[in-house]
């Protein structure tokens, strides 16, 4: 029988146990230049990570025609031909309660002139406990944290009682259309 509440210490210990793997994953993710229209390789990496953890994965192209008339849509003047969202789904055997969406974006803002960078923006470095690199804080760390938070719970033998959707979306830095498409 499962206890009503998982001990805080056990959760913190499980997070600590997976922390080095989480940091390594984030470093790998930061290495992907995922500016607008260059997100596909990073999204393929996310899909592979979700699949490796045993989640059902859906990866699809954002279709502007499906979201064009929705509240929150932002007009675009760029092609979405290579803009793919990725959703991993945790589905319990007997779902109870409300589902949860953990949404983060894979795209990053342009680097600007590289000569203004102290280091290569896509070569992550850890200094004084902080990771530096394009997207390390916004928002690739969030994508990594969501994946590894569920991994920590699973390592304890627990799983959420309801569906959980891990969403890695494109186009947050410009419009938010990736998240809008993901919610359809």
Image: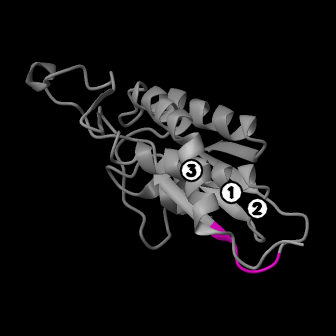
Instruction: Residue lying at the far front in this picture: please name it.
Output: 9
Do the residues under discs 2 and 3 have CB atoms within 8 angstroms? no
Q: Residue at coordinates 77% horizontally, 61% vertically from top-left?
A: 158
Mark 2, other Cα within 10 Å: few <14 / some 14–19 / many ≥20: some
Magenta residue span: 96-100
In front here: 35 or 122? 122
Measured as percent of width and height from the top left, residue 18 is found at 58, 41
Residue 160, relative to residue 115: is it above or below?
below
In screen coordinates, is 68 left or right of 183? left
Q: Nearer the viewer, residue 130 or 174?
A: 130
Which comes sooner in the sequence, label 3 or label 1? 3
Question: Is residue 167 among the parts visible in the rendering?
Answer: no
Q: Looking at the image, is mark 2 or mark 3 earlier in the sequence?
A: 3
Residue corresponding to mark 3: 15
Question: How far apart in space, not on screen, are marks 2 and 1 (Cα)?
Answer: 6 Å
Is residue 184 in the magenta section?
no
Q: Is residue 121 above or below residue 22?
A: above
Mark pair 2, 3: CA separation? 15 Å
Element on which disc 3 rests: helix
Report the residue marked by disc 1.
Answer: 153
Q: Nearer the viewer, mark 2 or mark 3?
A: 3
**Residue 36 is drawn in which quadrant?**
top left
Can residue 21 be seen here?
yes
- Residue 83 lies, in percent from the top left, at 51, 39
- Tell whether 122 sits left or right of 117: right
Residue located at (73% from left, 34% from top): 52
Q: Residue at x 26, y 26 (%)?
A: 121
What is the distance, in whole Å, between disc 3 and disc 1 at their CAs? 8 Å
């Amino acid at each position: 029988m499962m206890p009503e509440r998982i001990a805080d210490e056990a959760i913190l210990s499980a997070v600590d146990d997976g922390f080095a793997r989480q940091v390594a994953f984030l470093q790998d993710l930061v290495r992907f230049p995922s500016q607008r229209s260059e997100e596909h390789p990073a999204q393929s990496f996310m899909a592979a990570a979700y699949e490796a953890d045993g989640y059902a994965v859906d990866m699809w192209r954002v279709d502007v025609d499906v979201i064009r008339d929705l509240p929150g849509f932002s007009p675009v003047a760029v092609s979405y031909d290579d803009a793919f969202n990725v959703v991993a789904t945790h589905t319990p055997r007997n779902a109870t309660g409300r589902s949860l969406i953990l949404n983060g974006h894979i795209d990053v803002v342009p680097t600007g002139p590289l000569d203004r960078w102290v280091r290569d923006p896509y070569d992550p470095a850890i200094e004084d406990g902080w990771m530096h690199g394009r997207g390390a804080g916004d928002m690739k760390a969030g994508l990594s944290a969501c994946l590894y938070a569920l991994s920590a719970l699973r390592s304890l033998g627990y799983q959420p009682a309801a569906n959980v959707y891990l969403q890695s979306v494109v186009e947050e830095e410009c419009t938010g259309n990736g998240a809008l498409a993901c919610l359809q």
